[in-house]
Amino acid sequence: MKKIPVHRVDLIFEKITCKEIFEKVMEAKPDEIIQSVIDSGLKGRGGAGFPTGLKWQFAAREKNDEKYIVCNADEGEPGTFKDREILDMVPEKVFCGMAIASRAIGAKIGYIYLRGEYKFLVPKLEERLKDFHGLMKKMGHPFTIHLRLGSGAYICGEESALFESIEGRRGEPRNKPPYPTKEGLFNKPTCINNVETLVYTVMIQKYGAMHFKEMGTKDSRGSKVFSVSGDTPKAGIFELELGMSVKEFVEEFGDGDTKAVQVGGAAGFCVPRKRFDETIIGFEGVPTGGSMKLFNSSRSMYNVLHNYLDFFAEESCGQCTPCRVGCQQLLKGIEAVKKGEKSIKYLDELVKLAATMKIAAKCGLGQSVGNAFSSIVDNFKEEIIY
Amino acid sequence: MMITADSIQDMVERHGRTRDALLPILQEIVSEKNYLSDEDMVEVARALDISAAAVFGTATFYSFLDSRPKGKYVIRVCKTISCSMKGKNSVLSTIEETLKIKIGETTADRKFSLLETNCIGWCHKAPAILINDEPYTDLTPKKVTEVLREYIKNR
Amino acid sequence: MVKLSINGLLVEVQEGTTILEAARQLNFRIPVLCHHDDLCVAGNCRVCVVEQLGGKALLAACATPVAEGMQILTNSLKVRTARKHVIELLLSEHNADCTKCYKNGQCELQNLSNEFSVGDHIFLDLIHHKDYTIDRYSPSIQKDDSKCIRCQRCVRTCEQLQGVNALCVAHKGEAQKISTFYDHSMAEVICTNCGQCINRCPTGALVERTYLDEVWDAILDPEVHVVAQTAPAVRVGLGEDLGLEPGERVTGKMVSALKRLGFDAVLDTDFTADLTILEEGTELLTRLKKALVEKDPEVALPMTTSCSPGWIKFIEHTFPEYLPNVSTCKSPQQMFGALAKTYYANDREIDPKKIVTVSIMPCTAKKYEADRPEMRSSGFKDVDYVITTRELARMVRQAGIDFTMLKEDKFDRLMGDSSGAAVIFGATGGVMEAALRTAYEIITGREVPFENLNITPVRGFEGVRQASVLLEDCVEEWSFLEGVELKCAVAHGLSYARELMQAVKDGKIEVHFIEVMACPGGCLGGGGQPIPTNQEIREKRAAAIYDEDMHLAIRKSHENPEVLKLYKNFLGEPLGHKSHELLHTHYKERERY
């Protein structure tokens, strides 16, 4: 397996003129645009990693006069803050990505769903949107972007919950199928992409699919913006080529005493020191929406897990049993083991429960609670118990 | 700030009468007065021709759409992992001591309310808080005291 | 068509069929909790998860449509483990005081727990961590949050089936709960007391407020004369709770059981249903006369029925501007109560103070109706206690009566006689049909022009139905109606009622007379009827009702001899002074939440 050392990239924050790129896009046929995104190997940067080009193709094939482009800017995963920075630094590139997608699938309306915690960005975004709409008008491309705000609900980052929220309801994930490309926002074909993903589609138009594809590995092409936090002297936002191992990452970002890295936020995986070398950051190893949190030996992994479970117990939408009750049971369960009210064997029951949550919960949130739980309990059992 | 039936009508004019206007309307009310009263919800329900219970059920799903009175400034202290690792507790107790309120409470002059919240996306500059919509990061007890002093004095 | 295999057996089903339905075709029952045949798909409880070979996550059978070539396992190790976990999780947030629970023995969660041999709960009891309340303020519905498993059937019932939206899901995560506006009591909100949520609640979270102890106390008090009245729909539902199949008419057995329980008189709400037709029919004709002859612009048309207390509370909250359109007639239950403590008391020479009237209703809203302050025109509370069909079945069981073996008995006299027209009050469209049978005959002197008096256009289960009758060769008194096409509309279930009223409001429907029943199928699908309920069961009950009608000698309300006697000896004439005092009421506008 090809391993890539930590290699900084500057695509996302590169200052470019969107007008030129969009002119190019207007000359291309929708199929060609989609093909270039497929060729690039770009996968969704929100965490789930669905091939972006395919998503566009599915949406493009739907015959419907009403289609939507939605930009998922509900960045709520603990430890992720790169979308905020992208929207702050290069908002026009996000709009441009949406416009490219609208051209590709045939949509006239776009929505940006921005988490309420980032409301301070609104005045700036609205101002830039005015310019953008002016550009669209000038280019003769009928595409309007509406800005919608969340109001403090992590689950709204789940695509169908996000649609429910835009539609004015509780952000409860829907049953799938149907998938968004068939029935999404307002039950119309919808293409929903993460902020960062959209910017990459712009850069793919600018530099070509190959430029992107050449970076990274077979399963994880290109680069990615990482949000680095925790016990690190270099907390912040870094765009790095995909394919590096956790070891290489820790060598670059660790404080010399890193005992574990939580890759992918509360919904991600905990990688212990002994697995740093063998674990690739990417879809072949541990996928991530960009959250990289380092823990040094002074940290109690019980506290870390407790914090995550507390988060999930509150942020579960509450509609499905495995997630609503399961999160509470995992949380209260580790407390009971810690206090000695439940035997050590009870942890095994909880691991089984986490496995059930992974396969029986309704949406990605409930299904991913087990990731953090199992990976922390498996690797730091003694810290959970004693 | 008073929210009247008229001002809600005005919001409905701007955001529309369809269900998807609900959150923008509720958000606008909350940005005016930091919470939603039962009268507000009934009025919004009437304007959008949906049930008041549906408005209540939707509003309570969202942590930022409070259905109980809040002060002029709502302080939300991030309690998620990074902030919690980087000294959130001392920042929180500083705020509690400065304002003489606990989590969930509002000062007697209805100026400040104190709440905890989940990750607000400033993990690299932890600990962080929001005061209304404004983020404050890299906080220390000293720094948060200064921030609060500014609010107490000037706003 | 889509081909798939379930547990190795091949099946071919229509596209769009869910895995749950496909499995049913192969006689595999997949357990469900949030799913209900009457409601839209939820996919929340996850009890119905099944395994798809090759798939990572399990699928909710109730929410997943079949796909070509699927290989589904409904009872694999993965499925069993997950299903048991889900049941155990639900039990961990459920106040499992089963032996003391009103729903003991009829609880879907209890059944599942038993089926999967859930012994000692392996998970922690979450109940003690939470601050639960039991809402006992409503006279009709008791809501116990500690028993709630958040399947949201009640919310979907209230929202989609009934269009009421009194219940909602509030908060999220561990705090999520089934709530009302600001978590007010059910008594303080827009709840119509229809009880449809009770019919669909899988546990004891939503049950009727029961008045069995009060009724037993009255029966067992030798000083008190206890009069029972039974609503038309009870006789086609009661059997289901006492070991009989849906659709069995048990009128005679029911009367017999009531007598054995110790009621001093077993009378029939059907009697006042006939009376309602005379009062309401006359009211309609009077309104028509005012509109057509006197050209009175004030007269409110279309006139709507007023028998269904769920409908009354609904319109008071939702369309208060149409309150003048609602017939001022009390419901048959309340007419009965008012007469029981006046007419009946006089005739029997019993001090009305010593009469306790108990009505047995397919309805929970009737409990609320009996409590309304307007319902005291006899000088007493006209109807003292209302119990549901289910509660009556419980009384029969408590008294150790072997219901299936009972001989049939007849209602007692004075207010025990009824016509077929009264019986069909229990089905949607029944009041309309009964009214037309009488009104047409009054106006034209002839029977309604339908074979066997069966006015089929107003029957059936379509949500909103319209029909019209041309009035020709009218008798002299009603000659102003000559050539008029009497138009009527029928709605059942409050979401259809809302649809109909909105159409009236928007001028899209122009009719003279509207019948609304709050519950799907009418009273036979009432919130006090045996559980479970579904379309098939409701159709069987309806068939039984129409069957009962066909078997009665008198099938028109105005031919009920006891009603005629009542007018002659006591009331005078329809809409007369005494009627006005005892049989009519008024309504009030209510809050919007």
Image (cartoon, helix red, strand yellow):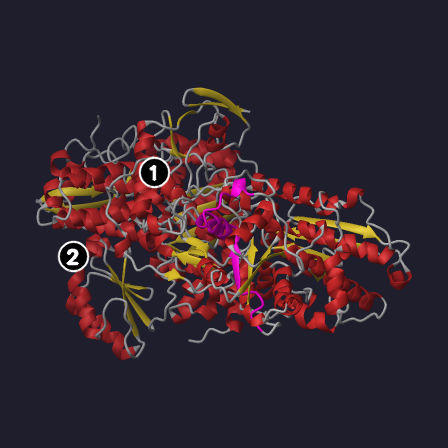
Q: Quadrant of the N terminus of chain C?
A: top right
Q: Quadrant of residue B88?
A: bottom left
Magenta residues span C380-406
Residue C148, how many percent across, how many down?
38, 51
Circle 1 packing at 10 Å, graded few (<14), some (14-19), many (20+), is: few
What is the chain identity of the residue bearing mark 1? C
Circle 2 packing at 10 Å, graded few (<14), some (14-19), many (20+), is: many
Q: Amino acid at mark 2?
A: Lys
**Residue on which disc 2 sits:** B86
In terms of secondary structure, where does tag 1 sit?
helix
Q: Quadrant of residue C108?
A: top left
What is the chain identity of the residue bearing mark 2? B
Q: Give the camera-side residue of C511 and C339.
A: C339
Q: Amino acid at mark 1?
A: Asn
Distance, label 1 to label 2, CA atoms, is: 49 Å
Residue A131, how many percent across, how many down?
46, 56
In terms of secondary structure, where does tag 2 sit?
loop
Q: Number of labelled discs?
A: 2
Is residue C385 positioned above or below C377 on the image? above
Residue C167, how many percent across, how many down?
47, 57
Disc 1 and disc 2 on one polypeptide chain: no
Q: Give the camera-side residue of C534 and C475.
A: C475
Q: Give the camera-side residue of C50 and B44.
A: C50
The verdict on residue C394 being magenta is: yes
Q: Which residue corresponds to the image point at 43% horizontal and 51% vertical from the top-left?
A: A112
**Residue on which disc 1 sits:** C114
Q: Which residue corresponds to the image point at 78% horizontal and 52% vertical from the top-left?
A: C437
